[in-house]
Image (spheres, rainbow, N blue to C red):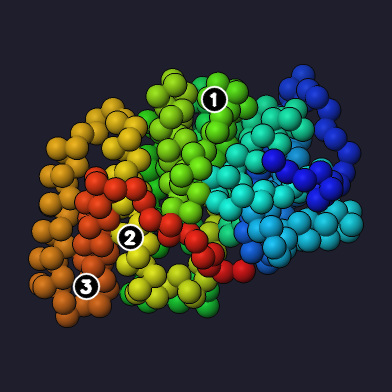
Amino acid sequence: MTDASETVRAGAPRPAKAAAAGVVSVCICIPTFRRPRGLARLLAALPRLEGRFVLDVVVADNDPEGREGLAVAREFAEAGYALPLTAVPAPERGIAQARNVLIATALAKSPADYIAMLDDDCRPDPGWLAALMEIIAETGADMANGRVAHAIEGGAEDAAGTFWERLRRPRPRGPVGHLLGGIALVSRSVFERIEPPWFEPQYGLSGGEDEDFFLRAAAEGCTAAYTPDAVVTEFVPASRMTPRYLAKRAFAQGMTYTYIRRRRRPSGWSAGGEAVRIAASLGLGAVGYVLLFWSLRHRRRAAWRIARAAGKACGMAGRPADFYRLTQGR
């Protein structure tokens, strides 16, 4: 539940239907936790999105103590923000909990046909939303997402940067089985079809709530697409560049990945097949670490492969750890 006394609102409400004028209505949903600078950067970028859209914005502040997200939204509202803006508290700690508050607020307060999901440490390119809408129109998909680029603090692209290079690789353009990552454009009908909570609270501090939701949506018959033309830049602070952090993140990613699939049993996945892949990754990682020890870049890649495979093995037996108890960056 949210406290109405803490709600921030700015701008006039959008008309209930814009489709008749050939315009698509989109509600942009942003969870935030102790990243006031990141949220301000994102809010400043949203009015520059290109395309035939009417937009409104909902922010959910997941910090009941500092409430920096609500303060940033209030500052933008008082300065005459260009888009209708609603900011609400999401006091129960966890990214899944914040996302559920966002979706409930969007469905209740916004007439939008689509819900766009963005994070407070990213910034979309001006053509991001138009590219997503284009691939949805081409494929008839219910949802779509695109490529995530990474801007590393200080511009450093040392050996640790190879971890983020791997995440930059685009998927083929067109229909996909389900979406990867929580930055996406989703038809309102998807959220109306799936019974809440849309994002399972058990993933609140571990992450993976977005992928779990997209697997549930795929199981319900919702279709998805991907386009590399829709680009969002994620800002990576120096604290996310340390070998210790990256090894822990690789482990957490592997653990969450396998745990979710063990629960959801998506098409093409089996415990036996996953066990074979885990063993192969451990073996390749160990061989690579020894043979390429002379190269810091390759040695770290091998270490991350081992950490991810170890996390997958743990995910076969237990539930994900609370990796996101502490936030990174401001």
The tag earlier along the polypeptide, 1 or 3, is: 1
Residue 299 is marked as: 3
The tag earlier along the polypeptide, 1 or 2, is: 1
In this rendering, position of residue 171 left or right of residue 200:
left
Q: Tell me which amino acid carries mark 3.
A: Arg
Q: Are marks 1 and 2 in contact (CB under 8 Å)?
A: no
Secondary structure under tag 3 reads helix
Q: Tell me which amino acid carries mark 1.
A: Glu
Q: Residue at x 17, y 80 (%)?
A: 294
Q: Residue at x 28, y 27 (%)?
A: 267
> Can residue 190 be spotted in the picture?
no
Residue occupied by mark 2 = 250
Residue 49 percent location from the top left of the image: 69, 47
Q: Residue at x 43, y 60 (%)?
A: 323
Categorize mark 2 by other alpha carbons within 10 Å: few (<14), some (14-19), many (20+): many
Residue occupied by mark 1 = 195
> Can residue 17 be spotted in the picture?
yes
Work out whether 286 lies above or below 130.
Answer: below
Work out whether 73 lies above or below 237.
Answer: above
Q: Give how far apart the Cα atoms at labels 3 and 2 are.
A: 14 Å
Residue 86 percent location from the top left of the image: 78, 45
Q: Tell me which amino acid carries mark 2.
A: Ala
Q: Give how far apart the Cα atoms at labels 1 and 2 are.
A: 31 Å
Instruction: Name the mark nearer the viewer: 3 or 2.
Output: 2
Q: Quadrant of the N terminus?
A: top right
The answer to which image quadrant residue 112 occupies is: top right
Nearer to me, 261 or 185 = 261
